[in-house]
Image (cartoon, helix red, strand yellow):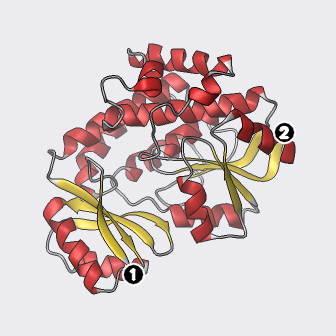
Amino acid sequence: MAEGQIAGLAFVFPGQGSQAVGMLDDLASNFATVADTLAEASDALGYDIGALIHADPDERLGQTEVTQPAILVTSVAIWRVWQELGGSDPAMMAGHSLGEYSALVCSGAMSLAQGATLVRDRGALMQQAVPEGEGAMAAILGLTDEQIVACCESIAGEVAPANYNAPGQVVIAGAAAAVAQAIDACKEAGAKRALPVAMSVPSHSSLMSGAAEELGERLAGIELQMPRMPIVHNFDASVASTTAEIADKLKAQLHNPVRWTQCAEVLAANNIEHLVECGPGKVLCGLQKRINKSVTASAVNSGEALAELLASL
């Protein structure tokens, strides 16, 4: 562990779905760092992302190519407030889907401008990859991973697990008709719940293969740095040893399932005792309770929560 890092602590970053209008208002009213971060991202993106996060006047926050930079910028702003308050680096980091990019920015592997424009492009590529209405996602609760895989394989169309979020909680994705059939198959197999997810694109499915290739081209134009602390990647729940490997894992992540359960298990195996969810919402905290209750989790999306965490360490 590098000098100045906090043993037993990992910062984790949420993905798409955690966004909310006004998600930075509390911190923005108390820390000038937030305004500086929003201005920096706005310059890179070419529009006022701070105004969008604060009020969403044109109702664009739900659009994938807007949602992704908005969540990343929010996570980075919270991280910078943590640093301003005197918080040290955690021993490790990880992020769920889009959150992996937030982790890379906060760890110094890429700049905020690089990260914001990259996830904007990622969102646009995802949206363009599958015509609206032709792809779908669904949450399946109460079946084992193996049962869900078997249900998906029983369907003739394109559908497979996209997010292994926690034991008994998996999201599937693929062609809309195939996902609908897989929902029925999972219900017949005894799922407690099997219902569509409000996502405009079938993320982390094979339908994203073309988008992944184009994302790889954009990644090739970015000069990455090795992060200051290990980051556990979604694609294979491992830590990259080179910047080329980081780029490869980001590309692969787009059309392969997010192995979040496995990522959390890797963090625990590396003596992580507490996860800090750095970003909007508390989704990852909720998942951690299902994965491993011996590793505690807390969300820091307010100045009060950040101060409490700092005081507890």
Query: What's under tag 2, amino acid-wise?
Result: Gly
Q: Residues within 10 Å of mark 2 (few under 14, many from 20)?
A: few
Q: Nearer the viewer, residue 24 or 288?
A: 24
Query: What's under tag 1, amino acid-wise?
Result: Glu
Q: Nearer the viewer, residue 12 or 270?
A: 12
For the residues labelled 2 and 1, the Cα–Cα distance comes to 42 Å
Query: Residue 69 location, x and y as percent?
Result: 43, 31
Residue at (44, 70) in percent of width and height: 169
What residue would you read off at disc 2? 4
**Badge number at residue 118:** none
Q: Would you identify the image quadrant in which residue 57 lies?
A: top left
Decide if residue 183 is on the left or right side of residue 295.
Answer: left
Q: Would you identify the image quadrant in which residue 60 lies?
A: top left
SS type, badge 2: loop
Q: Nearer the viewer, residue 24 or 41?
A: 24
Decide if residue 292 is on the left or right side of residue 19.
Answer: right
Residue at (57, 27) in percent of width and height: 25
Vertical comparison of 34 with 267: above or below? above
What residue would you read off at disc 1? 146
Residue at (38, 26) in percent of width and height: 56
Q: Earlier in the sequence, mark 2 or mark 1?
A: 2
Q: Would you identify the image quadrant in which residue 123 lies?
A: top left
Residue 217 visible in rendering: no
Query: Residue 46 location, x and y as percent?
Result: 38, 14
Decide if residue 90 is on the left or right side of residue 106.
Answer: right
Residue at (81, 47) in percent of width and height: 6
